[in-house]
Structures are given as C-alpha cells and as structure tokens.
Image: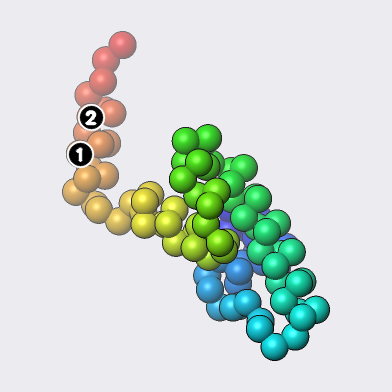
Amino acid sequence: MTMALRSKNKLHFINGSFPRPLDDVQDTLAWDRCNTMIMFLLNNSVDSEISQSIIWMDSASEIWQDLKERFYQGDVFHISDIQEEIYTLKQ
C-alpha cells in the first residue's frame, strides 16, 4: 500500500505530515478530495468486516493509524509462536 501511495505522491496524507489546510478554500477542497480518494483506496483494500469499522473515520491518516495499531507485527515472540504452529500443522 505504501508503494502505491508513494507512486501517486500521496504518502504524506497517511503519515500525517500534510495536515488539512484551513486558510485557503481551494486548498482545503483539493486536500479533501485527495484525502477522500485515499480513504476510498484504504477502505477497498481491507476485508469487509474491517471496512465497517474504518468507514466512519474522518481522515486517511486516522484510518492508517488505526490499521497500524491493529495489525502491527512487532511482537517477535508472538510471531515466533504463530510460525511454530504453522510448521507443526499436518494435513
């Protein structure tokens, strides 16, 4: 997903480095349009059950942060346990 957003020069919308402008109406409208497009892309990239929980969020960065917190795989011990279970599965 990050590769797709980077290729479209939209990665800064999900990492929060490009906040919504409030001083210029045209900039705000353009930002809203891009943000909505990214939200649509993120929403269509996840399972329908997950989609139902993120569809009401207001920004792409909020959705991205929620997905990151939910699915971050930083727990090495948990990953190791899952891999061990996979290796011991028999058909």
**Residue 9 percent coordinates (x, y):** 70, 68
In this picture, is 70 found above or below 35?
A: above
Amino acid type assigned to the residue bearing label 1 in the image: Asp
Res 84 seen here: yes
Res 7 seen here: no
Residue at 66 percent across and 82 percent down: it is: 21
Amino acid type assigned to the residue bearing label 2 in the image: Glu
Q: Quadrant of residue 87?
A: top left
Element on which disc 2 rests? helix
- Whether residue 3 sits left or right of residue 63 in the image: it is right
Residue at 50 percent across and 49 percent down: it is: 54
The reply to whether dot 2 and dot 1 touch (C-beta < 8 Å) is yes
In this picture, is 46 found above or below 27?
A: above
Number of residues whose C-alpha sits closer than 10 Å to that of mark 1, classed few (under 14), some (14–19) or many (20 or more): few
In this picture, is 45 found above or below 86?
A: below
Name the colouring of the figure: rainbow
Name the mark on residue 85. 2
**Residue 10 percent coordinates (x, y):** 67, 66
User: What residue occupies the far right of the structure in this picture?
Assistant: 26
- Report the residue marked by disc 1: 81
**Residue 25 percent coordinates (x, y):** 77, 81
Name the mark on residue 59. none
Q: Quadrant of residue 11?
A: bottom right
Residue at 27 percent across and 15 percent down: it is: 90
